[in-house]
Image (tube, rainbow, N blue to C red):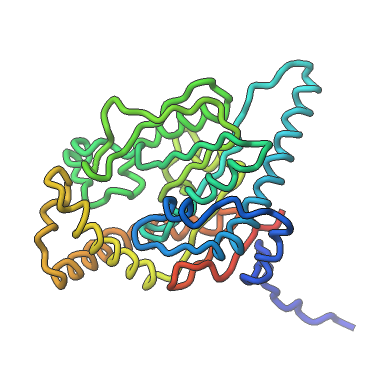
Amino acid sequence: MTAGPVPDVEVSRFVEFGRDQWAGLRASTPLPLSEEQLSALQGLNERVSLDEVTDIYLPLSRLLNLYVAATQTLHDATATFLGSAAPRVPYVIGLGGSVAVGKSTTSRILQALLARWPTHPKVDLITTDGFLLPRRVLESRGLMNRKGFPQSYDVRRLLRFMADVKSGAPDVLAPVYSHLAYDVVEGEFHRIQQPDIVIVEGLNVLQTGTGAAGKFVSDFFDFSIYVDAREEDIEQWYVERFLTLRETVFQNPSSYFHRYAGLTPDEAVATARRLWQTINLVNLRQNVLPTRERAHLILEKGGDHSVRRVRLRKL
């Protein structure tokens, strides 16, 4: 008897969790943040409740705590085998996603929660904005309308930074970015001194098309997270953020975007949508979204900013 054709079966690389399923994985992890502390961690127009922290971020912090502990044990085993003291090497977490999707808030909440675990109290957070090329260079190359695209970063500098951090170097400097000046701040740095964990947040962290000497930023990650949402929701959040900035930061004469401060509400909405559709949406589709499946964990957000589904890559 001849066997018939084997039907195609789609095999997912991820285990999927609904919100309630994921929340149940919190186990007995305590909630260490108050409403006031959480409020200080949130970005513009982002509404994150303590319930969201309890249901989504506490289980994630528990998972990462287990991973960090396992990695620390592995390093100790290697040091024992080699008969020498191994340098203190941070556990590195990469966090990517679109502009306006909530990466910064997610990173700050994770930093606060992870720092409260007793085995890794020192947690640093850096953004890849500091590794953008200086504004004068972007202007000279005609790249101001492609800021955030792969070609707008000093990738070699970012890779050197990641290599130094992951090698256990005692003192590593990360450049600082000013959103007010819309530029890298010359001579200002964030100092990384062998923390337990480093969170690296940015648009480009999971990309593979801009490596130097065959290396990519993600090669240095122990774990990676992608914050995901529907395009139409991200666009709405981008517009809402632009309107808030128009009434606050853009009013400062030192702001690079001060020229937008005098726009009427309708003009501001139209300008925000134009910037989104011609720059940020293009970057999302071409360079950011294609990296989503490379993440170890994907947080899928709904229109109210709450996470509706979590996808964890199978080991």
Picture coordinates of residue 61, whole percent (x, y) = 63, 51
Picture coordinates of residue 56, whole percent (x, y) = 59, 61
Query: Compared to 46, does 71 lie above or below?
Result: above
Picture coordinates of residue 293, whole percent (x, y) = 55, 59
Give the quarter of the image for residue 86: top right
Q: Residue furthest right?
A: 1
Give the quarter of the image for residue 304: bottom left
- Side (left or right) of 275 relative to 281: left
Query: Residue at the location (29% across, 25% down)?
Result: 187
Picture coordinates of residue 14, whole percent (x, y) = 65, 63
- Side (left or right) of 51 relative to 70: left
Query: Compared to 284, does 199 lie above or below?
Result: above
Position of the N terminus by quadrant: bottom right
Query: Residue at the location (28% across, 36% down)?
Result: 184
**Towards the viewer: 111 or 90:** 111
- Side (left or right) of 21 relative to 236: right
Query: Residue at the location (41% across, 60% down)?
Result: 101
